[in-house]
Amino acid sequence: MIVRILGEGQLDLTDADLDVLNSVDAQLEAAIESGDEATFRQALHDLLARVRQDGKPLPPEDLKPSQVILPPADATMAEVREMLQDDGLIPG
């Protein structure tokens, strides 16, 4: 699965990584729903860190379409709320 972090580039993740990412994604959604800025910041940080840790960076010239687009680390709660889909930022 190709994941793009806005402003950083694309990373290739395996389907096995989805379970862990979905868990953090659920925490992020809950923080947005409750308006908890501190938990939102931590969950966004954790989600992006996990993608960077587990993902294999793709070269900039690789133009494969991204299945998932994640916000940058400095995104606001409102910006991330606009990006959410029915099942969060990470499908599944």
Image (cartoon, rainbow, N blue to C red):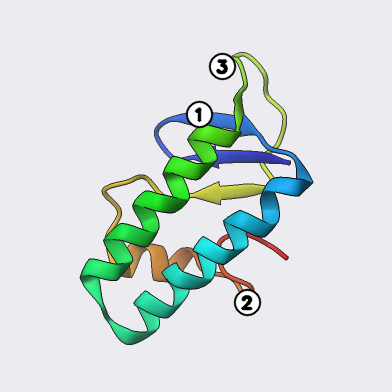
- Name the residue: 39% across, 34% down: 7
Amino acid at the residue labelled 1: Gly
Of helix, strand and loop, which one carries label 3? Answer: loop
Left or right side of 2 for 69: left
Q: CA distance from mark 1 to mark 2?
A: 24 Å
- Name the residue: 36% across, 76% down: 31
Amino acid at the residue labelled 2: Asp
Q: Which mark is residue 67?
A: none
- Among the two numbered marks 3 and 2 on one chain, the one whose residue lies closer to the N terminus: 3
Is the residue under label 1 in contact with that under label 3 (CB below 8 Å)?
yes
How dense is the environment of label 1, judged by Cα within 10 Å: few (below 14), some, or many (20 and up)?
some
- Name the residue: 63% across, 77% down: 86
Q: CA distance from mark 3 to mark 1?
A: 7 Å
- Among the two numbered marks 3 and 1 on one chain, the one whose residue lies closer to the N terminus: 1
Q: CA distance from mark 3 to mark 2?
A: 30 Å
Q: Position of residue 69 (x, y in %)?
A: 55, 48
Q: Which mark is residue 86?
A: 2
Is 62 located above or below residue 84 in the figure? Answer: above
Amino acid at the residue labelled 3: Pro
How dense is the environment of label 3, judged by Cα within 10 Å: few (below 14), some, or many (20 and up)?
few
Is the residue under label 2 in contact with that under label 1 (CB below 8 Å)?
no
Q: Which mark is residue 60?
A: 3
Residue tagged by mark 1?
9
- Among the two numbered marks 1 and 2 on one chain, the one whose residue lies closer to the N terminus: 1
Left or right side of 33 for 92: right
Query: 52 or 91: nearer the eye?
Result: 52
Is 73 located above or below residue 83 in the figure? Answer: above
